[in-house]
């Protein structure tokens, strides 16, 4: 006996087309192209979730480095002293301090750097 499965196929196609709404031209209207666009978009999304973490870490390091240089110390020396003094602040918090609380950051630099 033959099973057509029209309802299941239609639902699957509609799910892909719904996800593809907003894509340019036939990428949002024709199932074959929409499926390719979806696959590509999901691949980019996966890749960029990883890249976002790298980009933010890079930004935080730049901000901490700039603030540390304003206080007369290099990034690597500051981070080394921070680890030795066992202060458990991560780069995200340090970067926020550097931007929004420069005085607090200066106090922290004075506290951790050896005389």
Image: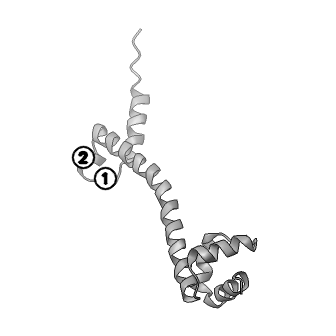
Q: From what the image shows, is residue 29 above or below residue 4?
A: below
Residue lying furthest right: 86
Tag 1 residue: 23
Residue located at (46% from left, 57% from top):
51
Q: From what the image shows, is residue 20 above or below residue 91?
A: above
Q: Considering depth in this image, is 16 or 83 the residue closer to the camera?
A: 83
Q: From what the image shows, is residue 91 above or below residue 101?
A: above
Provide residue 22's location: percent of width, then percent of height. Answer: 33, 55
Q: From what the image shows, is residue 34 above or below residue 9?
A: below
Provide residue 29's location: percent of width, then percent of height. Answer: 28, 45
Quadrant in the rendering for residue 84: bottom right
Residue located at (54% from left, 72% from top):
61
User: How many other residues sit within 10 Å of disc 1, few (<14), some (14-19) or many (≥20)?
Assistant: some
Q: Considering depth in this image, is 22 or 64 the residue closer to the camera?
A: 64
Residue located at (44% from left, 55% from top):
48
Residue lying furthest bottom: 103
Instruction: Indicate which disc residue 54 carries.
Output: none
Provide residue 78's location: percent of width, then percent of height. Answer: 63, 77
Provide residue 3's location: percent of width, then percent of height. Answer: 41, 16
Circle 1 — which element? loop
Tag 2 residue: 26
Circle 2 — which element? helix
Image quadrant occupied by the C terminus? bottom right
Image quadrant occupied by the N terminus? top left
Left or right of 109 on screen, residue 50: left
């Amino acid at each position: 006996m033959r099973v057509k499965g029209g309802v299941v196929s239609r639902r699957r196609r509609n799910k892909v087309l719904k996800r593809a709404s907003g894509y340019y031209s036939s990428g949002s209207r024709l199932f074959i192209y929409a499926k390719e666009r979806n696959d590509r978009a999901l691949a980019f999304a996966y890749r960029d979730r990883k890249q976002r973490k790298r980009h933010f870490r890079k930004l935080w390091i730049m901000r901490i480095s700039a603030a540390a240089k304003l206080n007369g110390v290099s990034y690597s020396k500051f981070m080394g002293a921070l680890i030795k003094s066992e202060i458990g602040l991560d780069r995200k918090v340090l970067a926020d301090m550097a931007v929004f609380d420069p005085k607090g950051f200066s106090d922290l630099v004075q506290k951790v750097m050896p005389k």
